[in-house]
Amino acid sequence: KTLLTEGRNAQALVIDFEEDLAGLSKEAMGKAAEEAKKRGHEGKYAITLDSSGRRWQNALCTLEKRTIREQLMKLSASRNTDGEFDTRLIITKLAKLRAEKAAVLGHPHYASFNLQEMAIETYEAA
């Protein structure tokens, strides 16, 4: 497992009331109840950010309550940004290394280098 995967799997939106899940299928509600129970929230519902079946993305499309969709989207957007699963320093270092690599190889930026690797002469042509 990677840090990204572990961080994504660790997070879940815990929902207290079944009516807040309006729009989800009975099967999805059952899975959310099982997940909440596994996480120590028996009697509640949990929508995880894991990638299996893209449940959280499907939930964004079907949940009727805007506030719940918004909470789920915010949780997704903030994953891996704090705590033990924070990847911001790694991403920053990777971006700097890619920029350095591109400069050493005579490119104005990494996008230019990367596109050339894909047999596209310039980023403008893409």
Image (cartoon, grey):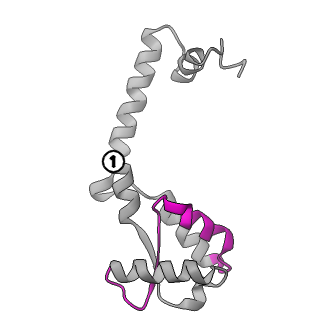
Residue extending farthest to the front is 27
The structure residue drawn at horizontal position 58% and vertical position 77%, both measured from the top left corner, is 68
Which residue is tagged 1?
2
Examine the structure image and report whether residue 60 is included in the region drawn in magenta: yes
Residue extending farthest to the top is 106
Question: Can you say which quadrant of the picture contains the C terminus?
Answer: top right
Depicted 26 relative to depicted 98: above or below:
below
In this rendering, does residue 4 appear at all? yes
The span shown in magenta is 39-66
Task: Give the percent coordinates (x, y) of residue 2.
Answer: 33, 47
Viewed as shown, does residue 59 lie left or right of 52? right
Which amino acid does the dot numbered 1 rest on? Thr
The structure residue drawn at horizontal position 52% and vertical position 64%, both measured from the top left corner, is 74
The structure residue drawn at horizontal position 54% and vertical position 62%, both measured from the top left corner, is 53
The structure residue drawn at horizontal position 38% and vertical position 62%, both measured from the top left corner, is 9
In this rendering, does residue 81 appear at all? no
Task: Give the percent coordinates (x, y) of residue 109.
Answer: 53, 20
Examine the structure image and report whether residue 47 is included in the region drawn in magenta: yes
How many numbered discs sit on the rendered protein? 1
Depicted 88 relative to depicted 73: above or below:
above
Q: Which of 114 and 36 is in front in this view?
A: 36
Q: Nearer the viewer, residue 75 or 51?
A: 51
